[in-house]
Amino acid sequence: MASGAHARYTPAMPTLRFAIAAGPSLGLGHLRRMQVLAAAARAADLSVALHVGDAAGPRPADLIADAAWPPDLPGPVPAASWDALPAADALIVDGAIFDAAQCRRWRRRTGCLVVIDDTGAAPRPADLLVNPGLAGGAVDYAAHPVTAVLRGPAHALVDARFFAVPAVAAESGRVVVAFGASDDGRVGGPVAEALLAAGLPAVDLVTSPLWPVNETVAGLVAAGAGRLVHHHGAEMAALLADAWLYCGAAGVTVGEALAAGRAVVAAALVADQAPNIAVLKAAGLAAFAAVDPAAMAAAAVAERAWRRPRPALAPRPGGPARVIAGILARLAQDC
């Protein structure tokens, strides 16, 4: 690739700019993992700027006011449109809303364009493509217009806190039910109810901080008679510290649960979680193509009787730092 196609890299203090798809209809998974990557960039003495929004463009901070924002990261930066993002040494893009045409426009005026991808379903031009997902190693990027690829468990974008949580016995631990920041309880509630009906003694139901809680949740909590605790948003590392099982969506959180050494029962909520379902099934784990409360509860009971070792596809510590090193390596080669 000709270096003249890009803005020049300035090595003194590289600036990494992030374009992140997040919000009530998109969830917060992309935001969570980009916050982890931005923290790794800051630890490497790099400057970061995070732009967060949906297809309409970068939104002000109040769009995600209820989402946890790390105190050591600068807050989200507004912009007139996605095309109006200021130039940067590297632009890191996470979200399916950013299509190939958008990436081509960004690439013409960015030192290095880094695309975070989960499925390989929609080829986009990039100087560096990163697939941090559980299924990253199974995706064929040979025909994609990218210069370099990083993927697999070694490049998982998981906060170090998940690797540090202690072991919990299934007999005394809790089950965390979470279906992402687009669920107000209509998805997770029936799953939590099925788990209680199957005899699981303690369940934490997490609903989206971006949506009002569905009216059915209060009734489920009351019927649970102390066995069901509802969280309107949650700090997942802390919640998993008291849990032996994660039962929920097959997105970012299932990787975090595996990193924490927790058993998992996962289901796909959206199409881009299907690759994770495939590799989880191949590893012998309980994974479902769609949410099925009764089947997921039965799988949870089975997991309680037989605890599996951590699978090889589980994220490994140090992934964010490895991705930052990969970005700096591309910048050093002028992408």
Image (cartoon, rainbow, N blue to C red):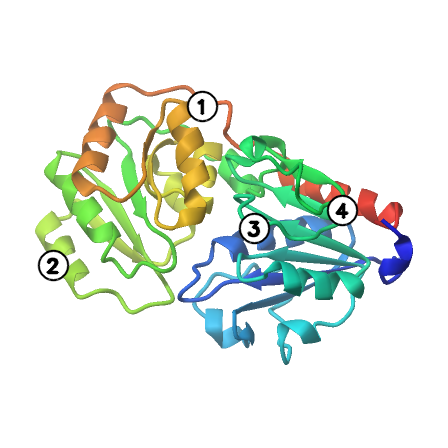
Q: Residues within 10 Å of mark 2 (few under 14, many from 20)?
A: few
Q: Position of residue 160 (x, y in %)?
A: 57, 40
Check disc 3 and give the amino acid type: Ala
Residue beneath disc 3: 122
Q: Residue at x 48, y 53 (%)?
A: 29
Mark 4 or 3, closer to the camera: 3
Residue beneath disc 2: 219
Q: Is residue 209 above or below residue 205?
A: below
Count of numbered labels shown in the rendering: 4
Left or right: residue 329 compared with residue 281: right
Q: CA distance from mark 4 to mark 1?
A: 29 Å
Residue 327 numbered mark, or none: 4
Residue 310 numbered mark, or none: 1
Q: CA distance from mark 2 to mark 3?
A: 42 Å
Q: Position of residue 113 (x, y in %)?
A: 73, 55
Check disc 1 and give the amino acid type: Arg
Q: Residue at x 80, y 66 (%)?
A: 109
- Nearer to me, 102 or 227: 102
* Circle 3: element type: loop
Q: Pick whichever of labels 4 and 2 is earlier in the sequence.
A: 2
User: Does the residue at mark 4 contact the one at mark 3 (Cβ under 8 Å)?
Assistant: no
Visible residue check, residue 254: no
* Circle 2: element type: helix
Left or right: residue 65 compared with residue 248: right
Left or right: residue 248 compared with residue 293: right
Q: CA distance from mark 2 to mark 1?
A: 36 Å
- Nearer to me, 100 or 168: 100
Q: Pick whichever of labels 4 and 3 is earlier in the sequence.
A: 3
Q: Pick whichever of labels 2 and 3 is earlier in the sequence.
A: 3
